[in-house]
Image: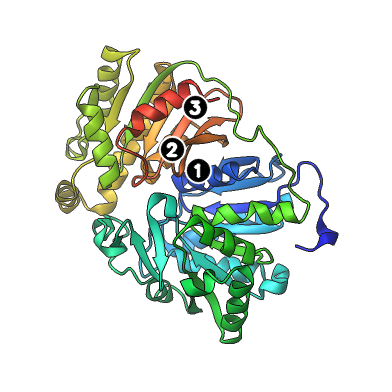
Amino acid sequence: MNSDTAHRSANQPLLGCIADDFTGATDLANMLVKSGMRTVQTIGIPAPGTSIDADAIVVALKSRTIPAAEAVAQSLAALAWLREQGCRQFFFKYCSTFDSTDAGNIGPVADALTDALADMQGMANGFSIACPAFPETGRTIYRGHLFVGDGLLNESGMENHPLTPMKDANLVRVLQRQTVSKVGLVRHDVVTGGAQSVREAFARLRTDGVRFAITDALSDTDLHVVGEACADHVLITGGSGIALGLPANFRRAGLLPERSDVARLPAITGHAAALAGSASKATSRQVAQWRETRPSFRVDPLAIARGERVADAALAFVREHLPEPVLIYATASPDEVKAVQQQLGVEAAGSLVEHTLADIARGLFALGVRKFVVAGGETSGAVVQALDVKALQIGSQIDPGVPATATLDGSIGLALKSGNFGGVDFFDKALKRLENPA
């Protein structure tokens, strides 16, 4: 970022982000707010002519598991809108566990965005990193291998994911299977050499024809180094962790002032409820913890398939317990999920649960619920669409990767959690934070 570009209008955003699911978008927005950027998350692509006053805008899509061609089309449409806003740098955000299949969607979308930004590439020269590392939540990359805690990705439980089973921890191989572009690696010993060392590695990789570089990172310090090295990149791809190092680039260029109120949210009145659709280990523990002492209702996909009025039964259960918060969950063990998928099919099982939880969310709103805690990316997408949420202002962090949020008009408070995130007491913590968001 050159000094002669250190001017912008008061409401012109600096960073335009495209996230492949709703909780991932919130996770990224949380990271940017923590680093001092006023951030707004849109639910889908805003209408043409919409203008948003923020330092960063995160467009949340539901493109992670749809056909690659559709994911590419949606991502390019989001990019076009963000370019209309005047963004100077762009970020393609995906999960810190690199959720994808050999068909995509990370590789195809990254290729399409790079092609679309060819007229802006400049010093980046059509080159981008791919860095899903998020050390604060235990996701680290070493020699191109993604670790979750102390184990490899393919031994973390993600190998059992119903839609994107991750059976290979070597991200160079994983991404290479998704793209015709050459994929390379920036090793950790290069990263520890500082930002200039990383920039020199980028230059060598570009000379070798590499378009995407998996970049090692074991700590937040590493992410700051990599982020600084990417100051001149038009496109960055990765998890939310890499966003730690981006705001400082804008600040050094004189484009981002220091602010103390970026995480302020309005107080939300009304009842509260939690909805969980994720089958991850973390969400399973959180559901179990809640059920020990608090009311909960299980959504059974087989009952839905039999034609039972599961949403009506769930809302009747909620009425019995109001004003006490209730958890509505479809979370199940991997064996239970597989058994349901064998009977109904993978897509049908997921669709039944999503549609039912969306119906329940609308019913909860009609009952006066205004504070929603939602676990799972697909579930979060279904819920915010059911509630007709168009955009979110981002507040302070509840747990790593999960902030409190509120609609722009302050009428609804939401905590949207990726399935794998949050401590065992997350639902309680989130409800308390939505009750007192300041």
Q: Is residue 322 left or right of residue 337?
A: right
Residue closer to the observer: 319 or 126: 126
Q: Which residue is mark 1?
A: 26
Taking the view exactly as shown, the residue that stands out farthest to the front is 193
State which quadrant residue 333 falls in: top left
- What is the secondary structure assignment of the residue under circle 3? strand
Q: Is residue 437 left or right of residue 253?
A: left
Q: Position of residue 411 (x, y in %)?
A: 55, 22
In contact (CB < 8 Å): disc 3 and disc 1: no
Above or below, 109 against 306 in this view is below
Amino acid beneath label 3: Gly
Q: Does the image show residue 309?
A: no
Above or below, 7 against 330 in this view is below
- What is the secondary structure assignment of the residue under circle 1? helix
Quarter of the image with the N terminus in it:
bottom right
Taking the view exactly as shown, the residue that stands out farthest to the bottom is 208
Residue drawn at x 43%, y 50% is 136
| Distance from Cα at disc 3 to Cα at disc 2 | 10 Å
In contact (CB < 8 Å): disc 3 and disc 2: no
